[in-house]
Amino acid sequence: MDESARAPLRQRQDEAGKELLWDFELGPPNGLMRNGWSRNSLKKGDKVVVDGYRSKLATDGANARSVVMADGRKVFAGSSADSPATQ
């Protein structure tokens, strides 16, 4: 069973002016809380920057590694990209 959190995020526009919807995979909820997240960390309309790895299978999917919040805080996504083997 996949316990990872998913975060659908909208990118304002691509190069052609089309709005995009990305599906970022984050770590499990308890891992997100240990990494500084709370249920109020993101609100609809917040502008964030996500660093991660694009999916090989889904053109609109990615594994998030970190998120820079609207206030400038960098919070780790608790994903498999944070494992010691990839750091």
Image (spheres, helix red, strand yellow):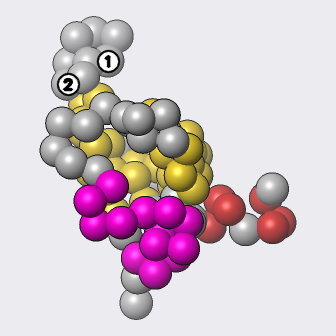
The amino acid at mark 2 is: Glu
Residue 28: name its quadrant. bottom left
Nearest the viewer among 7 and 42 is 42
Task: Name the residue at the top extreme.
Answer: 16
Q: Earlier in the sequence, mark 1 or mark 2?
A: 1
> Does the magenta segment cover residue 39?
yes
Q: Which residue is mark 1?
A: 14
Residue 74 lies, in percent from the top left, at 55, 44
Residue at image position (55%, 66%) is 35
Q: Nearer the viewer, residue 72 or 81?
A: 72
Mark 1, secondary structure of its residue:
loop
Left or right of 81? Residue 51 is left
Residue that mark 2 sits on: 19
Q: Are marks 1 and 2 in contact (CB under 8 Å)?
A: yes
Q: Residues within 10 Å of mark 1 (few under 14, many from 20)?
A: few
From the viewer's side, name the closer residue of 57 and 18.
18
> Of the residues shown, which amino acid type is indicated by label 1?
Asp
Secondary structure of the residue carrying tag 2 is: loop
The span shown in magenta is: 27-41
In which quadrant will I find the C terminus?
Answer: bottom right
For the point 40% across and 76% down, the residue is: 29
Q: Which mark is residue 5?
A: none
Along the line of sight, which residue is nearer the eye, 47 or 83?
Answer: 47
Q: Quadrant of residue 18?
A: top left
